[in-house]
Amino acid sequence: MSIDLNQFHTVFFEESQEHLDTLEQRLMDLDLGQPDPEDLNSIFRAAHSIKGGSGIFGFSALGQITHVMENLLDQLRQGQRHPDNALIDLLLSVVDCLRRILQRYREEAEPDWDEVASVTTDLEQVLACKGAGERDEVGALQADAESDAFGFFDDPSADEAGSDPADTVSANNDDVGWGLFEDDPPSGAGPPADSGAGPDVDTSAAFGFFDQPAAPAETKPGNGTTSPGAAATVAGQQAAPRKSNAAAASESATIRVGVDKVDSLINLVGELVITQSMLKVLGEDPENLDPMKMATVLAELERHTREIQESVMSIRMIPVSFVFNRFPRVVRDLAGKLDKKVELVLEGTQTELDKGLIEKLVDPLTHLVRNSIDHGIETPDRRRAAGKPEQGTIVISASQRGGSIVIAISDDGAGLNRERILAKARENGLAASDDLPDQEVWELIFQPGFSTAEQVTDVSGRGVGMDVVRRNIQQLGGRIEIASSEHQGSTFTIQLPLTLAIVDGMGVSVGGQTFIIPLVSIVESMQPPAANLNRLAGSNLLHVREEYWPLLPLGDVMDVTPRHRDPADAIVVLIETTKRRYGLVVDELVGQQQVVIKSLEQHYKRVPGTAGATIMGDGSVAMILDVESLADIVQDPIEEAV
């Protein structure tokens, strides 16, 4: 009896991708002074597993490289060879090559055998290197390997092996190679990184808004090899498995789910079947229908439906570590290329976010991290001159605030250069006065093509980027904000909804139209006593529990005529956002409900003050309010007076 092994290919590809992730993660974490034997064993096992599977399925290109790589790793774990930076760089470049080959097999395409032969030869030569000359010979081989473009950030003109399709998504969320940050598509022997993809949008512009000049276009020999004095370390990260973005179209169709979540869903479906049987019994005798029993069963049906909905949604929630764990490699490679010392700290890696959101976060986060390294963190000599430690720090954190996820990328670099941004704005014909608040100045960098970089390199300065970043985040229903202090650093904060699909909300009515307010933003609702209402500088204020809340009439914002103009006759919903607290004036409350979010931009157009729309039970359409953007138009006379 013959067995069709093709049916197991998908599992092999996914498991091999995880093994490659493990290889990269463990190699990055390896203590070169005293390598942990368990880390070395884990690295060896990952390579061995790929070798074994590739042999079964006849993927000889993978098997050929991992066979030699396995022998080299065996020397490390047996103590016959000591790891150093040059060897780690070479092994990481081999991991990149394996990702490209794996992608080719996914696409049922022939691997680049010239690249396979070259990488195999490099590994065999290193395998033969021992003794006093080992370090120098490995370093020389690594320089040759880098010239074949195994690193992430090589000069496009020197890219012979092609980009790595395993670690990016384009600005349009298409599956292109790591060439996301290059002007021209990679050429040479490697697999085409953007085969079948849409137009390539360069989102890598580091904008030169910082005091530090742009890095020179020339790159040092080795093109990505960590030079003496340059280092990148990783702190605070958790050893969670990292899910790469290779073959996004294939991987997006699968997700790993814990057995406990599946068991919970099965139990809820069982409860739903029992409730359906009860409804069937009641429906068989409609003439003697007991209204109380029917109401009870319908309440049970509603409860079970809601629980199933929540259970199904939880299946799509995965830790942000699947995105964060790619950045140690990004930081290491780019810091080494720019001769900078950078420590990366990852916080809140187990914070969960919808899988669809996580996949689309890769581009903007990668762009912001690269920008922080290139223009945020100064060179060691500049940091010493400024009285700072030679090693800069980048912190990527995630946290949940109510129904939102907040992701922040912070650095302790030079900060944004206000004067340079204003000068560039005027050069572009934008109205920019010297007395603009800092926050409005920072907003200028989101203008299309806004760049002040003095030199164009393969890392930065192409004048495209932050507008694409903000647009991508807005398409996810999110917002991005900037805070910066001169010589102290910058923080880019992204706020996103937990999920793209469902929101718990409170229905409110204004002028006969229904709007949905996210429940997590509501403090309380009330009909305010006239004695608690005050007017200051033309704006209404509500005094509640020793605090004054500025009021925003929803009818005025949405261009709807309300039934009640006087707040004392209306309902005030107290809203709390990340920016301020305010009261939303509406006609009446419709009731709490869970709604499915539909994109207005996709089906109609973007409506200011809204995060989307939903279809109500009677078939009508209700707008879902974006309370954060509404906070921007609230007039607070007390705050303005201060």
Image (cartoon, helix red, strand yellow):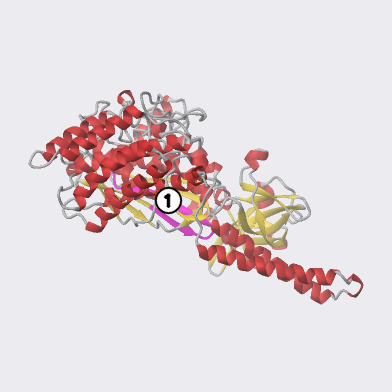
Residue 365 drawn at (x, y percent)? 42, 43
Q: Tell me where the magenta segment starts and ends, as one range.
A: 397-416
Q: Is residue 605 visible in the rendered structure shown here?
A: yes
Q: How many marks?
A: 1
Residue 600 drawn at (x, y percent)? 65, 42
Taking the image as shown, residue 536 lies to the left or right of residue 422, namely right
The amino acid type found where label 1 is placed reads Phe
Measuring 51% from the left and 30% from the top, which residue is drawn there? Answer: 197
Residue farthest to the right, as pictured:
287
Residue 597 drawn at (x, y percent)? 64, 50
Closer to us: 544 or 210: 210
Residue 413 painted magenta = yes
Residue 312 painted magenta = no
SS of the residue under disc 1: helix
Figure quadrant of residue 141: top left
Taking the image as shown, residue 407 lies to the left or right of residue 563, namely left
Figure quadrant of residue 569: bottom right
Q: Is residue 616 above or below residue 365?
A: below
Q: In terms of secondary structure, what is the magenta stretch mainly?
A: strand
Residue farthest to the front, as pictured:
1
Closer to us: 543 or 324: 324
Q: Neighbour class for label 1 at 10 Å: few (<14), some, many (≥20)?
A: many
Q: Is residue 274 above or below residue 75?
A: below
Q: Is residue 576 visible in the rendered structure shown here?
A: no
Closer to us: 624 or 98: 98
Q: Is residue 347 above or below residue 101?
A: below
Q: Is residue 61 above or below residue 296?
A: above
Q: Which residue is mark 1?
A: 322
Taking the image as shown, residue 270 lies to the left or right of residue 634, namely right
Residue 228 drawn at (x, y percent)? 15, 39
Closer to us: 440 or 283: 283
